[in-house]
Image (tube, rainbow, N blue to C red):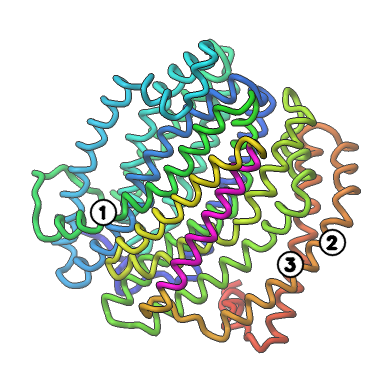
Amino acid sequence: MIHLQKSHPHRPVPMYKSFLSVSGFTLLSRLTGFLRDIVLSGVLGAGMMMDAFAVAQRLPNHFRAIFGEGAFNAAYVPTYLRVLEQDGQTRAQNFANQIFTLLLLSQVVMLALGWLFMPAFVDLLAPGFSRDPQKYELAVSLTRITFPYLFCITLVTMHSATLNAHGVFAVPAFAPVLLNVVTMAFLAISFLFPSAAYAAATGVVASGVAQLVLLMLEARRHGLIEKIAKPGLGQDVRAFFRMFGPAVIGSSGVQIAMFADTIIGSLLATGGLSSLYYAERLYQLPIGLVGVAAGTVLLPEMSRCFARENWEGAFTAQNRTLAMSVALTAPFVVAFMVIPDFLVRALFEHGRFQIEDSLATAAVLRAYGAGLLAMVAINALRSGFQAMGDTKTPMYVALGALAINLLLKIALYQPLGAVGIAVATSVNAWVNVGLLAILALRRYLFQPDKTFGSILLACATASVILANIALWLQGPFLALARAIGGVPGLLAGVAGLGLLGALVYGAALVAGARALGVTAAEMGLSRLIRRK
C-alpha cells in the first residue's frame, strides 16, 4: 500500500519552503564539513597523507557525480514524474523498481572493477604520485577502502530522487551530514588504525552505509522503497536511457575537469593538491548550499509544470530560483575574492597547517571565487532543458566548455601552479553558463522577467557595500580570533564577521530591491513572515 499523504504529487510542498529546507540541511552539512576539514588540517596537514587521502576521497566521488547525482537525476526525475502524472503510482513504482535493479547490478560490477584495478585508477587520477612510491602505495590502499562509498551513495541518490519527486526533501538533504560526523568520529579513534589517514578513509565508507540505511528507512516510511525486479527494457526504461546517456556525458564534462585538476595537481610540488582540496572545500559551500539546492528543487517543479503545460509557472519558478541563488551566492563571492586570506587563516591555520599553506590556499580560493556565480547558476539554467527531456544540449555545452577548460589548465598550471588550475575552472563555468543562457533564451526555456533584473541590480549594490565592510573589519576580527585562541577562537572570528556581513548585506539587498519596486511577495519574504 502506498502512503503519500505528505508527498502527494498534486499537492507539492511550496517551492520556496523546499528550497530553504534543502539549503538549511546543506548548510548544516557544510558546517560539519568545515569542522571535519579543520580536524583533517590539524591531523593530516597539507603533506603526503592529506594528498593521498584527497585522491582516495575524490575517486568514488567523481564516479558518483558522473553516474549518480547529476546524470541520474537529470534522466530519472522527469521520466518518473511524467509516468506518475500520466499513468499513476503503480506504473511509476514499477519503473522505479526496474531502474533500481539495473543500478544495483551496475554498482556491483563497478565495485569489483574498482578493487581489481585500483592501481590503474590511481595512476590515471594522480600520475605524479608514481615519483613517490610511499605516497602512491598509501593512495592505492586508502582508495580501496573508500571505493565502496560509491556503491552506497549511488543507491542513496536513487532513494533521494524518488523522495524529491514526491516533495520530500529534508531527509535526503540531511544525509550528507553523516559523512562529516562519522568521519570525525573515526578520526577521534585514529589510534586504532595504522595512521589517521586510514581512520579517515574508513570513516568515509562507514558514512556511506549510514546514509544508505537512513534513506531506505525514509523511503519505506513514505511507501516508496524500491524493490528488486526482473530487469527489462520497457517503454519507460528506454525513455530513461535515452536521456541518461547524454546526461552521463554532460555530467562527465564537469567531472573530467575535476579529474584534470587532480591529475595536474599531482604534478605540482607537495602541498599543491592539498591547497586545491582545501580551497575547493570552501567554494563548494555555496555550490552545495545554493546551486545544488536550486537544481534539486527546480527540476521536479519545472518537470511537473511542463507535464501539465503550465509554462508560466515553470518560468516563474525558474526566475525566482535564479534570483534567490544569485542573492545567496553574492556574499560568498565577495568573501572569497576580497578576504580569502582571512578565511583560510582563521579556518585552517593550526597544527600542521602553516602560514605558507594558508597563503597558497587563499590564492586558489580567490581564483575559484571569480567563477562562483556561474557555477551556482548552471544547475538552474540546465533544469529548463532537462525538464523538457533534453539532456543533449547541456551535454554539448558541457563538452565545449570542457575543451576550453582543459586547454587553459595545461597552459596555466606551470606558470601559475594551483592558481592556474582554479582560473581555468572559473573560465569553464562562465563559458558553460553563458552558452546555456543563450540557447535557453532562443528555445524559450528561460524567460527572465523584470523582477529578476531588479534583484540582480540590488545584489550588485549590496555586494559593493559588503566588500567595503569586509575589507575594513577583517583585521580586527582576525585579531579577535587569535586573542581567544584555539579552534573556538578561529570559528568565533569567522562567525562574527560572517554574521555582521550577513546583516549588512541583507539590509542593503532588501532596501535596494524595494527601491527598485520589488515587493516582499516577489522576494518570497511575505510568505516567510506569515509562517513565523
Tell me which label, 3 or 1, sits earlier in the chain. 1
Report how far apart the C-alphas of labels 2 and 1 lie in the structure.
46 Å
Residue at 58 percent across and 20 percent down: it is 49
Tag on residue 244?
A: 1
Q: Quick check: can you spot residue 32?
A: no
Q: How crowded is the residue under tag 1: few (<14 C-alpha within 10 Å), some, or many (20+)?
A: many
- Position above or below: 146 against 320: above
Quadrant housing the N terminus: bottom left
Residue at 31 percent across and 72 percent down: it is 304
Q: Which residues are magenta?
A: 418-439
* Residue 256 spot, x, y in % from top left: 42, 42
Q: Is residue 133 left or right of residue 90?
A: right
Do tag 3 and tag 1 residues touch (Cβ < 8 Å)? no
Residue at 20 percent across and 57 percent down: it is 242
Q: Is residue 472 left or right of residue 292?
A: right
Magenta residue check for 485: no
- Position above or below: 151 against 239: above
On the image, which quarter does residue 187 sit in?
Answer: top right
Report how far apart the C-alphas of labels 3 and 2 lie in the structure.
10 Å
Viewer-side residue, 528 vs 426: 426
**Tag 1: residue type?**
Phe
**Tag 2: residue type?**
Ile
Q: How crowded is the residue under tag 3: few (<14 C-alpha within 10 Å), some, or many (20+)?
A: many
Q: Is residue 432 left or right of residue 252?
A: right
Report how far apart the C-alphas of labels 3 and 1 lie in the structure.
39 Å
Q: Which residue is mark 3?
A: 463
Q: Which residue is mark 2?
A: 469
Asked which secondary structure carries label 3, the reply is helix
Q: Quick check: can you spot residue 356?
A: yes
Asked which secondary structure carries label 2, the reply is helix
Magenta residue check for 432: yes
Tell me which label, 3 or 2, sits earlier in the chain. 3
